[in-house]
Amino acid sequence: MTPPRTILDKIWESHVVKHLGDGWAILHIDRHVLHDLSGPPALLGLIQRKLHTRNPELTFATPDHAVSSMPGRTGQTFAGGARLWMGLKMLTAQQKIRMFDIGEQGQGIVHVMAPELGIALPGTTLICGDSHSCTNGGVGAMAFGVGTSESTHALATQTLRLRKPKSMRVNVEGKLARGVAPKDLALHLMRVLGPTVGVEHFIEFAGSAIRDLPVEGRLTLCNLSVEMGGRSGLVAPDDKTFAWLEGRRFAPKGADFERAVAYWRTLVTDKDAIFDKEVSVDAADVAPVVTWGTSPDMGIPVDGMIPDPEKAPERETRQAITAALHYMGLEAGKPLIDTKVDWVFIGSCSNSRITDLREAARIVEGKHVAEGVTAWVVPGSVAVKQQAEAEGLDRIFIDAGFFWREPGCSMCVAANGEQVPPLARAVSTSNRNFVGRQGPRARTHLASPASAAAAAIAGKIVDVRSI
């Protein structure tokens, strides 16, 4: 009799090409996604070894990290990224890999376009040279980031040599309160569980609060799983997932889709399956969260007080808090609410989908960005941009004083010249607030789209529940 299995067990076992012992295996990779920063080096590694892409039909590429988001942009608008864009374009053509180029339907941030196009599907293994590949777990894929040599190996063999990760389940029961977004839940989990709780683990998010989330919210939650130290995140696919995926460009069609759904329904953790680690969280405890420090776990409820290093239990923690407060220009023991804001960025693979833009637009409609605040909205893909424009969301943002940009990573990673100025304070819907992440000496507060939009209008950090 087969013992109870987790979703990870089921996907892993169905992809093993060969067991190598001690938990190691050769695993088949179903989908491989490339972007302009990590894609060219991996492809060059292939060519230098005089190899070819084994299954080019299973590999997809798009420029996102180093391309400008300026309206009317081309691949050469940002000179620093032009070589990378051209390299990706030339090398994918040489290897017969499908690339979704600038302005083309399908182009966008890799972790937005992959599920959007049905490249990421339940039960598939998906890799990309990017740590936030875990986003795709929101549709039930086993997705994770890889390094350049692993990417080259997968291009050549459509496999990877991997050691099975440990399993972890985070149960979130109950209902999220009004004004609390999936991003707030993710930031809350990091705040209470810490940035290393998921190290060496695949994290399955489960419970009634997770089942209530729309697919886009699940993608946001899984996107932040790597910030909890996890190898990836995963949510069991269900009827919401199947409805969301039906009709997607690379999803199965007709009878094949029905057969696929029948299989996808088996991708649930069996009753009595054992995890290496399991924790539970009450959804009622989650409030809108805004980060105050220089790590995604350095967050507090928006109406809370900035931590005092003198009250921290350990010396290393006190030093970390002190350094973060100094970098962020904040004072211990003070409220975060009413902290003045200079920039607002709504975008990134965390929060640039249509539901995110709708939520932000709902907050700003009929209002205007505060004087002295620069606010950007960067859709996650061409499809998101087109849908937002069809719904009139672009006009809502523009009339409110926001800049409406072209799809890409933009200011999240600041690899395309788009940066928060030194010492300027930004509220951002992105996933990382590390020192210099959005530009040298930039001060970043992570928040949900609604909280970011509210900050742009108020010119300061506010509790979105009061609006």
Image (cartoon, helix red, strand yellow):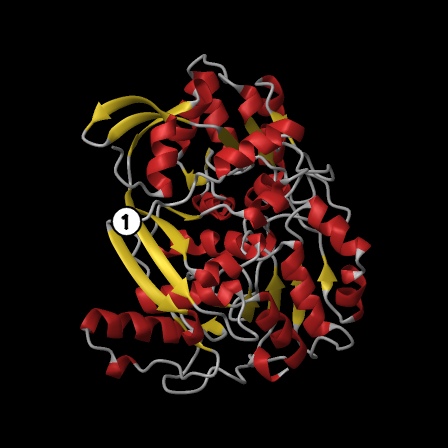
Vertical relation: 381 (above or below) 295: above
Vertical relation: 97 (above or below) 68: above
Residue type beneath disc 1:
Asp
The x and y percentages for residue 249 are 67, 34
Q: Residue at x 54, y 57 (%)?
A: 217
Q: Quadrant of the N terminus?
A: top left
Q: Can you see residue 295? A: no
Toward the viewer: 131 or 315?
131
Per the image, the residue denoted by label 1 is: 272
Toward the viewer: 319 or 408?
408
Circle 1 packing at 10 Å, graded few (<14), some (14-19), many (20+), is: few
Vertical relation: 303 (above or below) 428: below
- Outermost residue, bottom direction? 334
The x and y percentages for residue 7 are 38, 42
Q: Is residue 229 left or right of residue 347?
A: left
The x and y percentages for residue 65 are 57, 44
- Outermost residue, front direction? 1
Q: Residue at x 30, y 61 (%)?
A: 279
Q: Secondary structure at mark 1?
A: loop
Q: Residue at x 52, y 68 (%)?
A: 447
Q: Can you see residue 419? A: yes
